[in-house]
Image (tube, helix red, strand yellow):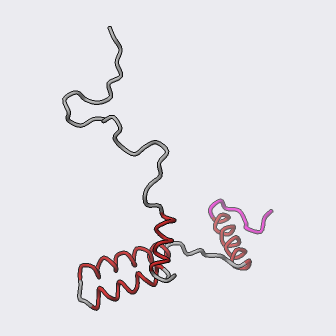
Amino acid sequence: MEKTNKTAKTNGHGGARKGAGRPKGSRDQVSIRNLLETLDVKTGGRDYEELLVDDFLQARQYGDTQLTLKYHNLILNKVMSSLAKIEVTDSKDAIEQKQAAFAEALAKLVGVSPDAK
């Protein structure tokens, strides 16, 4: 029996084709860096946020309800994710008050005086 390397289907429907696809080691045609650099050049260095707001206002001005709603969703999703990352820090006094309240509550649960050491 002769061994053969057949990667393509013989019936011509689907499957791998010799020479098809992107060559190994090739890079994507569109990179984030190139996209941002081109955007920077074409807009004269304006911030992306500034462009986004301008486009949103233009959609509202022309009465494009669907596009305006898409901008609302885009902007609200960004705002909401930023609001969800609020960091709360306590002062030293607040931490001591919480520790004392916790010790008192724990003492009540186990029937021990909070001043006992």
What is the quadrant of residue 115 in the picture? Answer: bottom right
* Left or right of residue 69, residue 45 in this image: right
Task: Give residue 97's position: percent from left, percent from top.
Answer: 69, 76
Q: Judge whether residue 81 is colored magenta.
A: no
- Where's the C terminus, which quadrant? bottom right
Instruction: Identify whether 100 is placed above or below 21.
Output: below
> Between residues 97 and 26, which one lies in front from this camera angle?
26
What is the quadrant of residue 91 in the picture? Answer: bottom right
Instruction: Identify whether 103 is placed above or below 10.
Output: below
* Left or right of residue 102, residue 84 in this image: left
- Where's the N terminus, which quadrant? top left
Q: Judge whether residue 116 is colored magenta.
A: yes
> Between residues 93 and 29, which one lies in front from this camera angle?
29
What is the quadrant of residue 77 in the picture? Answer: bottom left
Name of the residue lying farthest toward the right: 117
* Left or right of residue 61, residue 84 in this image: right
Name of the residue lying farthest toward the top: 1
Range of residues picked out in magenta: 109-117
Task: Give residue 62's position: percent from left, percent from top.
Answer: 25, 89
Task: Give residue 103's position: percent from left, percent from top.
Answer: 69, 67
Name the residue rendered at 20%, 35% in the picture: 13
Name the residue rendered at 47%, 72% in the picture: 38
Q: How many marks?
A: 0
> Between residues 60 and 94, which one lies in front from this camera angle?
60
| Main secondary structure along the magenta-highlighted residues | loop
Name the residue rendered at 40%, 78% in the picture: 75
Task: Give residue 22's position: percent from left, percent from top.
Answer: 40, 45
Name of the residue lying farthest toward the front: 19
Name the residue rendered at 70%, 72% in the picture: 100
